[in-house]
Image (cartoon, helix red, strand yellow):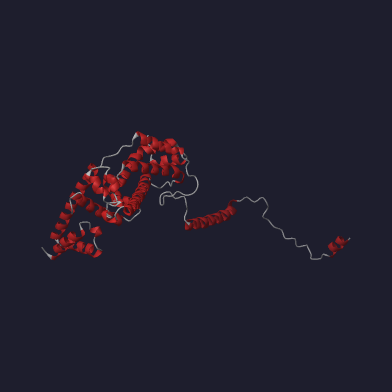
Amino acid sequence: MNIMQKFLANTLRNFGSNRNTWPRWRQFLLSICIALSDACRQDWQAAQRKVNAADTALAQTYVDGIAELTVSSVMTRRLHTITAQPQCRTGLASESGVMKAKMPFWQISCASAMASAVLGVALGAGGYVAEFTDSDVAYLETSMTYEVSDWLAGDIQ
Amino acid sequence: MLIDDSELMRRLAGGDQQAFASLLSRHSKLVLNVLYRIVLSRDDAEDLCQEVFERLWRQAPQWRDDAKLTTWLYRVANNLAINFRQRVQQRYVLNEDLLMAECDAASVDADAEVSMPLLGMNDNTLLRALASLPANYRAVLAFRFYRDLAVKDIAEIMGISAKAVESQLGRAKAQLKQNLGGGE
């Protein structure tokens, strides 16, 4: 038995066969041992097969050992009476993570900012498609003067 | 034609009793059995199962379309079952305190199993072995062995990391084997 096999046997004995529960440095060393030593790889595979067989047997014991319940007629009636209760149409559901009607604050902020930007672009782009009824030709009246005395005189009268 | 859970939940949000009946026939047995495997008592499992579906009915109008119904049902069932076991344990400890006050304290074993109310329920060896496990270990075993769920799905249901699930599963299996007399 080489040093790598001794390390593996020791780790299996002290930490079990699930490498995910081992300290990280042992997980790292296991990867190296498996890569470098065929004997180590075979030991590891044998340990895994043993664990899988034991787990399968335990799972079977679990499944066989507990009776599968059926929903009795009384229970069914009880469950069907639930619809007599009012549904919760306002407020938030209590189970976190699954039923969330609430929008996080940052999402509301982003949504408002995006809505403002879209509205600005839409209003600006509206100028391209708008139909103007007024003529867009302008005339400059050059005969006018700044003399307002006649007008003021007329106003006083 | 089989209507999927999402469509039934949309109908349920509108108060459709037929949709609720369909969901009951589809999921109530599984929820009941998962609960039974955690609380180890049919009566308690039925009470909790009713509570799960009461919540489903009440909260249906706020249902999120992207949520998976079975995950939600199992999560609520798991939370209720674990809280229930903690309440039972507290009640038992309180009763034990009362007993200790009335009797000679020295004659009472303070380390009596907290799962004592379960012992008269069933003589089944496996149930006895499970009764001495913590409720979260029973939950992880139920989801893994009974429902055959993947570790990441169990993690989502129980609200813990996949690594934590693996760790709990490993400990639960080892403890169950030991309780069944298999050891490690």
A28 vs B140, nearest the viewer: B140
Is residue A76 found left or right of A38 in the rendered image? right
At horizontal 32% and vertical 44% (from top left) the residue drawn is: B35
| Picture quadrant where residue A34 is located | bottom left
At horizontal 27% and vertical 48% (from top left) the residue drawn is: B131
Is residue B9 found left or right of A15 in the rendered image? right
Is residue A20 found left or right of B26 in the rendered image? left
Q: Return the residue found at the far right.
A: A157
How far across and down, in percent of the image, does residue B89 sit? 33, 51
Is residue B152 found left or right of A45 in the rendered image? right
How far across and down, in percent of the image, does residue A143 sit? 78, 62
How far across and down, in percent of the image, does residue A2 sit? 11, 64
Quadrant position of the N terminus of chain B in the picture: top left
| Picture quadrant where residue B69 is located | top left
How far across and down, in percent of the image, does residue A28 sit? 23, 63
B27 vs B91, nearest the viewer: B91
Residue A156 appears anywhere in the view = yes
Residue B149 appears anywhere in the view = no
Quadrant position of the C terminus of chain B in the picture: bottom left
Relative vertical location of residue B88 with respect to residue B23 in this rendering, above or below? below
Q: Return the residue found at the far left.
A: A1
The number of numbered badges drawn on the structure is: 0
B7 vs B77, nearest the viewer: B77
At horizontal 37% and vertical 44% (from top left) the residue drawn is: B48
Relative vertical location of residue A97 with respect to residue A40 in this rendering, above or below? above
